[in-house]
Image (spheres, grey):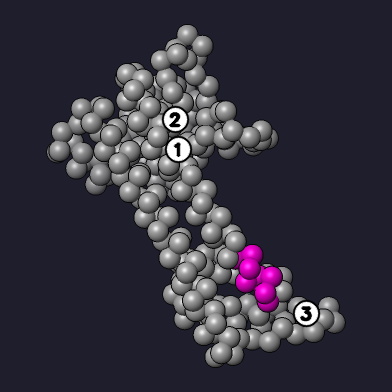
Amino acid sequence: MKNYFREILGKTLVSTLIREQFIIDRSLYIARIDDDTQSNFIIEYIISILNSKLMSFYFRYSNNEFDTLFPKIRVAEFKKLPIKIVELDLQQLAKTKVDDLLLAKSDVIIVFEKFKRYFVKSFSLFKVSRKLQNWHELGFGEFIKELNRAVKSNNKLRVKEGLEEVPTLTKKDEFEWLDLFEDNKEKAQDLQNQINQTDKEINAMVYELYGLNEDEITIVENS
């Protein structure tokens, strides 16, 4: 079980826990707890600190890293991040929240991919647009529009391959897809709401651990 963090950042530091064996490229680092301090930390607690808004704020301002396109964190900078040692029972609370967060993120990806595989298989699609890949961000009307567009585009490829064309959706088909789309989108939204809430709770916990007052929290939140 290892902690991985990404060299090129997004809006925040990006760190996660991977239990399986992976081959990684140079865009990822493997973070390991020193043997002499290992007993002081639960790894999920460290994840909660690294991914917090506070730690991202600290990194950017302490290293003057404000590149909005490709901000990077280097190993030397990573080692200087102030991970606070707290009682193990507090770390266990953080672990519970991180476990919940990772599970919800895994579940939402399953919902995304399962529904995508279903409509790709149903219409024998060779290619899927970025909008359809992110179907959960669409309303039903836009989803149907993109789906029909994909069917027509793929039919051109099918004709070239000498394959039978796939019919576009009729109004009856659209009606039958409505409940399926809405049910899966609701599942995805419920999981995303859970992710957002847990993430908010983790940030609040980190603010408290590092003793920030309301004014300081506001600065971090608005940065």
Q: Is residue 223 visible?
A: yes
Label 2–label 1 contact, CB within 8 A: yes
Q: Disc 2 and disc 1: Cα gap in Å?
A: 8 Å
Q: Disc 3 and disc 1: Cα gap in Å?
A: 45 Å
Q: Which residue lies at the image location 20% right of the left edge and 31% below the top edge?
A: 212
Of the numbered discs 2 and 3, the one sitting upstream in the chain is 2
**To which residue does mark 2 refer?**
44
Question: From the viewer's perspective, is residue 187 above or below residue 3?
Answer: below
Amino acid at dot 1: Asp
Q: Does the magenta-highlighted stretch encompass residue 118?
A: yes
| Residue 4, numbered circle | none
Q: Give the image location of residue 10, x and y in percent.
A: 44, 45
Of the numbered discs 2 and 1, the one sitting upstream in the chain is 2
- Using residue 209 as the reference point, say whether residue 155 is left or right of it: right
Q: Secondary structure at mark 1?
A: helix
Amino acid at dot 2: Glu
Q: Quadrant of residue 161?
A: bottom right
**To which residue does mark 3 refer?**
158
Instruction: Tell me where the magenta segment starts and ends, as one range.
Output: 116-123
Q: Give the image location of residue 186, x and y in percent.
A: 43, 65
**To which residue does mark 1 refer?**
99
Q: Residue furthest top?
A: 36
Q: Residue furthest right?
A: 162
Q: Give the image location of residue 148, x and y in percent.
A: 60, 82
Q: Which residue lies at the image location 78% right of the left edge and 79% below the top edge?
A: 158
Of the numbered discs 3 and 1, the one sitting upstream in the chain is 1
Q: Quadrant of residue 206?
A: top left
Q: Disc 2 and disc 3: Cα gap in Å?
A: 49 Å
